Amino acid sequence: MKYSQRAQAISPFFAMAFSEKAARLEAQGKHVIRLNIGEPDFGAPPDVLVAMQDLTRSVSLPYTSALGLPELRIAIAGFYQTAHQIELDPQRIVVTAGASAALLLLAAAFVDEGDKVIMADPSYPCNRQFIKAFGGKVQLVPTQANSRFQLNMEMLEQHWQAGTRGLMLATPSNPTGTAVAPDELAAMCEFARSKGAWCMIDEIYLNLHHGAAASSPTSALAMDDEALVINSFSKYFGMTGWRLGWCVVPERAVDVMERLAQNYYICPSTLAQKAALQCFTPSSIAVCESRRATLIARKKLVLAGLQKCGLHVPVQPDGAFYVYIDVSSTGLSAMTFCERVLQDAHVALTPGNDFGEYQGEQYVRLSFASAESELEEGLQRLALFMQRLHS
Ligand SMILES: Cc1ncc(COP(=O)(O)O)c(C=O)c1O
């Protein structure tokens, strides 16, 4: 049996590899502090859990429309209205099996053989794979702390090529948690549009912004009505394993998205979709907002703890639950640092190599989506590790 060249070329996901190594240590009875995966410890809001329990008593959970349950599409449009003051036609919302399926459908819909797609290095690793899966060519643009590890207009102008057909970015981003300023985002979308290219903006962490409660974050849709915008129930709503997300596309793209979804997976989980209707009740939103406040407190705890350890975080996150740590002062590569921290201190982190090629060997991602007690213990272990390294 021969594997396809595509399958053979796919890179490993180091975050998962470190999870497996952590599991092996746990099987030996070790308590591993897992700060390597971007998964909030909260779980779904209580109203969603109650709805799911009620739903499991109903015998029939038929397929929904490939575009998603109409009531859920309406509820998501309502969320854009209340959280972002954006009026949106529910018909433009495509409910998907996580943001992952939205990325897959959008790549299928917009990427042709040989198309070049610009994205930042570092960025979410799977994006490169989605583009390559449809024959696209990834144009990684090296970014550093001076641009908060995000693309900007200057870089776009400098790196844009004749065959560039798309711009892909996440704001706030994974692995750095940094956001693109609204003016910069608007300018970049306009630039891409002037070149006849599409803009795919991943807003999976948008509602996990670290601003004041009353300050509603700006969606790219407010600046560019044509943007292909991605979001998910995984992070803000704490529903990673439910596999539910969505994207917003221009009206004329809905038909092609429907055909692709019908063929690729028929529809997202009916159970998850029906329960997710409860995400948008005032009490669920209040729960999610209080969790967002908890994440901001955790960020402060982690930044202070890392500073005490002598580990440098060059840019503070604007959202999400990641810090991108520069480990170059330790003299270890990111991979070795992660290996040694896991083996010696039983703390799992993710090497920057996952997120790009440029300076990934120098950075390590820590996810502070874990409980405070775990974070405190993890920081103490890191401090001891650093002391031993220096002595
Ligand atoms: C930037 C980004 N986009 C998409 C995803 C995929 O999320 P989902 O669980 O909704 O498929 C992730 C997951 O970590 C992510 O960080």
Image (cartoon, grey):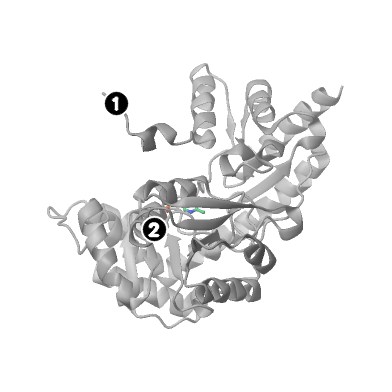
Query: Height in image: 314 above or below 3?
Result: below
Q: Position of residue 228 (x, y in %)?
A: 43, 68
User: Residue visible at 39% across and 77% down?
Assistant: 78
Element carrying mark 1: loop
User: Residue visible at 40% across and 52% down?
Assistant: 100
Element carrying mark 2: loop
CB under 8 Å between callouts 2 and 1? no
Q: Quadrant of residue 182?
A: bottom right
On-image quarter of the C terminus: top right
Q: Position of residue 131 (x, y in %)?
A: 43, 51
Q: Which mark is residue 81?
A: none
Query: Height in image: 356 above or below 80?
Result: above
Q: Nearer the viewer, residue 223 or 23?
A: 223
- Earlier residue among tags 2 and 1: 1
Q: CA distance from mark 2 to mark 1?
A: 26 Å
Most extreme residue toward the front is: 162
On-image quarter of the N terminus: top left
Q: Position of residue 21 (x, y in %)?
A: 53, 24
Residue 216 seen in the figure: no
Residue 352 seen in the figure: yes
User: Residue visible at 46% across and 79% down?
Assistant: 225
Q: What kind of residue is marked 2?
A: Val
Q: Quadrant of residue 70?
A: bottom left
The residue wearing badge 1 is: 2
Q: Nearer the viewer, residue 102 or 318?
A: 102
Give the class, few, some or many, for how many residues have Cα within 10 Å of label 2's Cα (few <14, many ≥20): many
Q: Position of residue 390 (x, y in %)?
A: 85, 25
Query: Height in image: 67 above or below 24?
Result: below
Q: What kind of residue is marked 1?
A: Lys
The residue wearing badge 2 is: 111
